[in-house]
Amino acid sequence: MERHTSEPSKWGQRLTRMDFTVTRENGRWKVVSKSATMLNTNTVVEDPAVLAAVRGQHTKTVTYVNTVVAQSSEELSAAESRYKDTPILDFINHVQTEVVTKALAGTAYAGLPVLSIAAPFSRTAIFPQGDVRIRDVAGLYVYDNTLEAVVLSGAEVKAYLEYSAKYFRTFAVGDTVDPATISDPLVPDYNYDVISGVDYDIDISKPVGQRIIRLVMPGTGTPVAADAQFVIAVNNYRRSGGGNFPGVVKTQVYNQQQEIRQLLIDWAQAKGVINPADFFVPNWKLVREGVSVF
């Protein structure tokens, strides 16, 4: 039996029209020809009947996403999060670390350092100074991922970072580094991760697999031991193998099926203020032969 599937896009942006020509032979239908066409929904005039049917839900949704959850002490942008440590990505890691640390209190894992992993999903996400709304948080964390945690060794953390660092193209010392072309076009932004809870440097003049030239415990300069143990806060997509990152496809020590985006909203509402002074800890940078790129 032939099966045909289509995944045109997200959020109703596209539709797929699938056409089949069939004929009846020996009491069964047979496909003679087939074709598919991508349709852009923004090229079609809205159907008044459909608009009327969903108007109530649409109004409720717009009201919800415009709900103010906190005040930001300054504008926080994700524009540079791929190649610089930024407060807005640290916000995600801070919340994830807090949630996992609290959940593991009193367990056998309570004494382990908690690291956190986040990806720069959006280059355009911004928390404006002043009112931060649900739509702003959703713009930063665009996926419906849930939070999980696993235990990794120091060697596994380094291997994970080496894999993530393949996101960057190689730039010899002296070469011009343009943020617009800094990444490998075959690696999407969502498959580049940063980790909080350890300090590290990524040398983009080195070959892939040899780029993590400094990996130390935070603020100490003490190298992370290969056999050290860490709890890693990570989203369910990554933990289940999304992106093929090494080491994290293993049994969880934390998994309460909590949506990360909602955890960010809950934290913001509870605090009332989003201030980088409460969570921004610069802990990684791009270098070439020990010299910062930015």
Image (cartoon, helix red, strand yellow):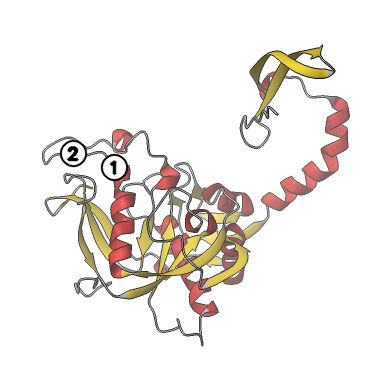
Q: Is residue 126 left or right of residue 67?
A: left
> Could you give the CA–CA distance between mark 1 and mark 2, rounded to whole angstroms?
9 Å
Q: Nearer the viewer, residue 161 or 279?
A: 161
| Residue named by callout 2 | 171
Q: Is residue 294 above or below residue 226?
A: above
Q: How many marks?
A: 2
Kindly identify the residue that appears in the image at 39 percent across and 79 percent down: 112
Q: Is residue 262 above or below residue 218?
A: above
Kindly identify the residue that appears in the image at 19 percent across and 72 percent down: 221
Q: Is residue 247 left or right of residue 32?
A: left
Q: Where residue 75 sits in the image (x, y, percent)?
A: 46, 52
Kindly identify the residue that appears in the image at 23 percent across and 73 percent down: 225
Local packing at callout 1 (Cα closer than 10 Å; few below 14, some 14-19, many 20+) is: many
Q: Is residue 283 visible?
A: no
Q: Amino acid at mark 1?
A: Phe
Q: Nearer the viewer, residue 40 or 166?
A: 166
**Quadrant in which the N terminus is drawn:** top right
Quadrant of residue 13 within the rendered picture: top right
